[in-house]
Image: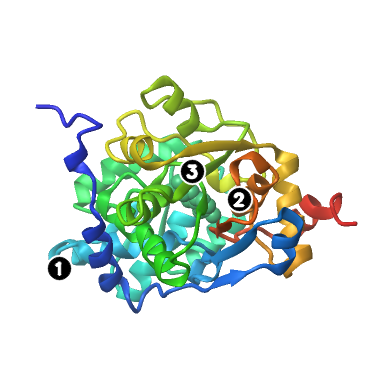
Amino acid sequence: MLNKPGAGDLFPGAGEIWKARKRITGLAGETPLLYSAGLSKVYRASVYLKLEYIQPTGSFKLRGAASKILSLKQEEQNQGVATFSTGNHGLAVAYVAGKMGIPAAIFISERVPEVKVNNLRALGANLIIYGENQDDAEEYCYKKAEEEDWVVVKPFDDPLVIAGQGIIGLELLEQLPDLDTVVVPLSGGGLISGIAIAIKTAFPHLQVIGVSMKGSPAMYHSLIADRPVNLKEKSTLADSLLGGIGLDNKYTFSIVQKYVDEVVLVSEEAIAEGMADLFRSERIVVEGAAATTVAVLAERKLIEPNSRVVLILSGNNIDSLSFIKAIGGYLK
Ligand SMILES: *Cc1c(COP(=O)(O)O)cnc(C)c1O
């Protein structure tokens, strides 16, 4: 029988998130929640920032990768793990494997920029360069993983990865139990799925809002079509939000359908302005994906005046020149 997406019993429950939290202590720690007086004044709400970019490797992805890799059997760990992500997920897998002393193979295409290659290599990962684009690298990753008995650590559509990201939700409920709204950057949906399960199973009336860039929001269009769809990618400041949700998506699509209140799209200008806003108000530097959350505040209709809003600042992997170029026009 097919594993039909939408079957509720496939979801990881809040209990899995508590277990993941226990499991990854020591590899990925709790992050602070910062009240922003500056943003609160501008946007007439109480704005809190969840500082996920301070995790080692600069993003929350460490939580999911650690949750998954630490759940593997000893033999599987000895055999090694693999992934085809060149972004924050790849960095997280390389970091966790390095810390645990287990082999990690990262599959990248010939097109991957040198900076990324160097960052991955610095973490001690075995880089396997194959093909002209990321799809080639992915296909080769699954082929080699099968031959070598490596576990492929998926970036979002895995209950153990989702449970890892969900720890952020548990921390928020402790740090600010009377929060009203959480705004979460949304791509494949692992991050928002975990957070939504943690928060909605405890307090169903709290609002969980996803945010993607206007250019190619795969989850947004999948929700409208009522099934996973692929989109052509358009270049964006929120490069960590690029990529589809997988046409054979098993978990995150149904979880987002069930628990997420709303998905908002933001323009490239609004993302750049969000980056500038965070820098101006708090001297915080984030990548475009994280700044999408600030852009949502400008959409006032979603946020009740004077409510308590948490923005998930998911990562800070951006080079200095790109950052300066992005915010340059918005600094007054
Ligand atoms: C991966 C990533 C996201 C989106 O996470 P999904 O689980 O794919 O929705 C958001 N921000 C940053 C910085 C990321 O690296």
Camera-nearest label, 1 or 3: 1
- Answer with mark 1 or mark 3, whichever residue precedes in sequence: 1
- Answer with mark 1 or mark 2, whichever residue precedes in sequence: 1
- Pick the residue in front: 57 or 169: 169
Residue 317, position in %: x, y?
60, 59
Which of the image's four quarters has the C terminus? Answer: bottom right
Residue under label 2 = 293
- Answer with mark 3 or mark 2, whichever residue precedes in sequence: 3
Local packing at callout 1 (Cα closer than 10 Å; few below 14, some 14-19, many 20+) is few
Residue 326, position in %: x, y?
77, 50
Q: Residue at x 29, y 63 (%)?
A: 67
Task: Give the CA distance from mark 3 to mark 2.
Answer: 31 Å
Residue 256, position in %: x, y?
38, 39
Residue under label 1 = 74
Query: Please, what is the three-letter code of the amino acid marked with disc 2?
Result: Thr
Residue under label 3 = 109
Determine whether the residue tagged by mark 1 lies in a helix, strand or loop. Answer: helix
Q: Residue furthest bottom?
A: 26
Residue 312, position in %: x, y?
53, 58
Query: Please, what is the three-letter code of the amino acid marked with disc 3?
Result: Ser
- Pick the residue in front: 59 or 196: 196
Any part of residue 280 in sight? yes
- Pick the residue in front: 262 or 245: 262
Q: Hey, which quadrant is residue 125 in on the image?
A: bottom left
Position of residue 290 in the picture relative to residue 73 (left or right): right
Residue 306 is tagged as none
